Image (spheres, rainbow, N blue to C red):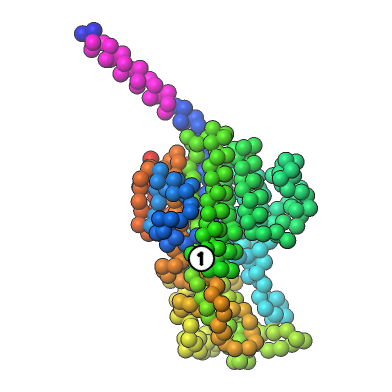
Amino acid sequence: MKRILLLFAGLTASLTGLAQNTANRETKKPIVILITIDGFPARALNDPRLPMPTLRKLAANGAIAEAMQPINPTVTWPNHTALITGVNASQHDVMANGLITFPSDGAVPKIEPWVDKDKLVHARTLYEAAAEKGLTTGQVDWVAIYGAKGVQWQFGEKPDVQGVIPQELIAQGIVTSEQVEQFGEKSSAAWRDQIWTDAAVDILERHSPDLLLVHLLQTDSLQHQYGPLTPAAYLAYAYADRCVQRIVDAVAKIGALDRTTFILASDHGFATSTHTVHPNVALSNLGLLHKQDGHDVGEVWASPEGGSASIYIRDEKQRADLVPKLKSYFEEVSGVSHVYTNEEARAIGLPADTASDQAPQLYLTAAPDYAFGSGAEGQLTSSSAPRGQHGYLNSMPEMQALFVASGAAIKPGVHLGTISNLRVAPTIARILGVQLPDAKQPPLREILR
Ligand SMILES: [Zn+2]
């Protein structure tokens, strides 16, 4: 009897302890840190000697996908936006690394990065959903976020020297005012990643946001220049891993590892090309672009993004005539794998041109080893030294991206096959307890505790 009583007492005590632990966990708000390693190709994970110990450790203690499929176009800003909205370009309308604008004189279209988020992104983001629930967000080098409401702490791609975080870094002697003011000039991609990581550490240690968005960029620059899976790319991956480790260390330092979930993702993969097709040369040859005061002008322009090119026919009256003609023309160009009309492109997730001026009338995709260039003069196709490219169709194996989740909310030891990157935002929303009603894909419930 005594023994039974003792057992009962012990059970009660452990149940009380369990209840207290649960209560502690409930009062401790979850933190989510989303880190993107720009252009990291999922296929690099197949190398057991990939020099990324932090990524491997996070994956071993958490969940990893064999591959994560990006959205079309497989370009940085459209996919970063997909990661935090859960919707593709047909809804968020981001087709390039900025807003595509069309000069009234018919000159080459421009891509304007520094336009307000509300003008560029037509979808509800995680940080807006978080702000509505009284949660706070920090961002470091995140994209399509300029002038966004709902972000409390930031050190942007184009940092504001008067901002709280740049001022804190200046006060600590990490950067000078001059370096912040000329952030993108005279600096290496690796140095910028270092400072952005310093900013992420500062935001975590001093402000403890509920959601932190971090974009590491030098892997993109290095892979464009030298190609994916080259010695230079491996060094870039290793350095990105070091930046991730510093962020994990900062979370440990503030004692928040038990409530923090890390999501590591990339926006797209990378392929190598040695040939470039210049669709604007074709448009010049067809008489659709012509010289005026030394500049090319016209109503029809191709806007290239590596493995794809968007063709805009600005004069609506000409579309019915030109769309079938240009489609037949480009289908015969070697190196062009597919030509989609706008209606066809909607099936691969692009916006309708009746709803958005960012939507092209024709969308060209490149065959392997080819990419699109912007030139309007010279040869239609040129060859070049091997260069890293993305922008190809999102079904191309080389375009598949990284997904690793680890930490407080994640079950250890989960291996996923190929997932869509549209599932990341609903998963983060679930962890933070916020709502993204337009994101139709389910959260990754199988990885959540
Ligand atoms: Zn990118």
Asked if the magenta segment contains residue 240, the reply would be no
Residue drawn where x is 64% and y is 37% of the image: 206
Residue 377, x across and y down, in percent = 65, 87
Please tell me which residue lies in front, 437 or 300: 300
Relative placement, left or right, of 103 versus 444 is right
Residue 129 position (above or below residue 47): above
Pointer 1 residue: 230
Residue 425, x across and y down, in percent = 48, 52
Residue 433, x across and y down, in percent = 48, 42
Answer with the quarter of the image where residue 187 lies: bottom right
Q: For the view shown, which residue lies furthest in the top direction?
A: 2
Please tell me which residue lies in front, 168 or 121: 168
Dominant secondary structure, magenta = helix
Residue drawn where x is 42% and y is 23% of the image: 20
| Secondary structure of the residue carrying numbered label 1 | loop
Asked if the magenta segment contains residue 7, the reply would be yes
Residue 13 position (above or below residue 63): above
Of the residues shown, which amino acid type is indicated by label 1? Answer: Thr
Residue drawn where x is 41% and y is 59% of the image: 47
Please tell me which residue lies in front, 361 or 8: 8
Residue drawn where x is 38% and y is 57% of the image: 66
Please tell me which residue lies in front, 337 or 318: 337
Viewport quadrant of the C terminus: top left
Badge count: 1
Look at the image and give the residue range highlighted in magenta: 3-22
Residue 412 position (above or below residue 310): above
Crowd tier of the residue under label 1, counting other residues whose Cα lies within 10 Å: few below 14, some 14–19, many 20 or above: few
Residue 429 position (above or below residue 252): below
| Viewer can see residue 148 | no
Viewport quadrant of the N terminus: top left
